[in-house]
Image (tube, rainbow, N blue to C red):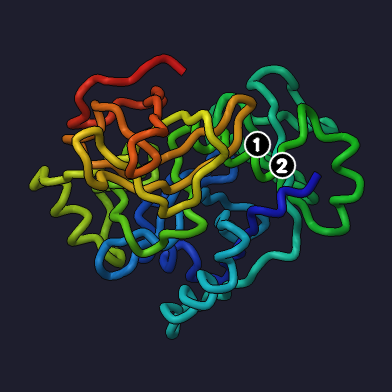
Amino acid sequence: MPLHALQLLRIAGSDRAAFLQAQLTQDIRPVSAGHGSRYAWADAQGRVLVAGEVFTWSEAFWLTVPAILAESIARRLRLFVLRSQVTIDIAGGILAGRFVPAGAVADLQGSALPRQPLGCAATEHWHALRLDAERLLFAAAPAAMPELPATLPGTAADAGGWALADIRAGFARLDSATGVYIPQMLNLDLAGAVSFDKGCYPGQEIITRTRHLGRLKRRLFRYASGMPPMAPGDPLFAAAGGECGAVVLAAATATGSEILAVVRLDAAAGTLFADAALRRPLRQLDLPYAVPGAIPGTTPA
């Protein structure tokens, strides 16, 4: 089943590595045929425009982006090409997301599948990137894709299931609310999408200064609700009254929904609500990483 919620940008040309190194929050030098990475791209004010994965395959770098943002991100990235020998295209291939626990399946069509997070494997016709312990993301050329669904391991993922997995991974894959938050507010530094040791890129001064000054007042948290999914941008409310955060990503579950929300650190440990009348409480859930500055207040998932 194609994962229509995501798209690939193909960054090719002899200057592709230098170009991306000067644009992304992540150091792409360690990205290799066997290992991908997470990344973000920010504006000059350090606000995140897009976040996803980056890998190299077939003499190009590939960026996963929400399909709804693909055109605008490609167009905006091209503004920075100038005289660089770089081409930026929306790839014609198709993405397929699969839930495949690490070690459950050793190979596909005779090629070993990656077991470590962000590990990669590829043939001439398809590429596999392991996002985490449960998920593989397959990319293939259109001509190869009709043959792959029948042979891909694991369980097919639809857009809702993939978004829920992103929420549980604590990865804010923005499809709206772009240009609003710096990476640390979205925990992208904790999710491995930011390098503080690399050279200049858009917004670096603000992003780095925020880290060194330690003045971050908001972070990303995960919550469960007994209600249908909220929309990105919907406000959250503290028990004492007043808005204290906003939804970034939401997905349905069997009992309601889960969300990722950027919340004030001083409010995150208390009970939050999805409505100003304080009638729809949210239950905070664990993230797979520790959140600096957070007061313990999570409950088991």
For the question of whether residue 65 can be seen, the reply is yes
Amino acid type, residue under disc 1 in the picture: Gly
Q: Which mark is residue 279?
A: none
The residue identified by callout 1 is 161
Say which element carries label 1.
helix
Residue 94 as seen in the image, left or right of residue 276: right
**How many numbered badges does the structure rendering display?**
2
Report x, y in % for residue 202: 30, 67
| Mark 2 and mark 1 residues within 8 Å of each other at the beta carbon | yes
Most foreground residue, 229 or 48: 229
Report x, y in % for residue 119: 57, 35
Report x, y in % for residue 184: 27, 46
Which quadrant would residue 21 be assigned to in this image?
bottom left
Q: Is residue 223 above or below residue 57?
A: above
Report x, y in % for residue 209: 13, 54
Q: Residues within 10 Å of mark 1 (few under 14, many from 20)?
A: some
The residue identified by callout 2 is 158
Residue name at image x 71 percent, y 18 percent: 104
Amino acid type, residue under disc 2 in the picture: Asp
Q: Is residue 90 above or below residue 145?
A: below
Residue 146 as seen in the image, left or right of residue 247: right
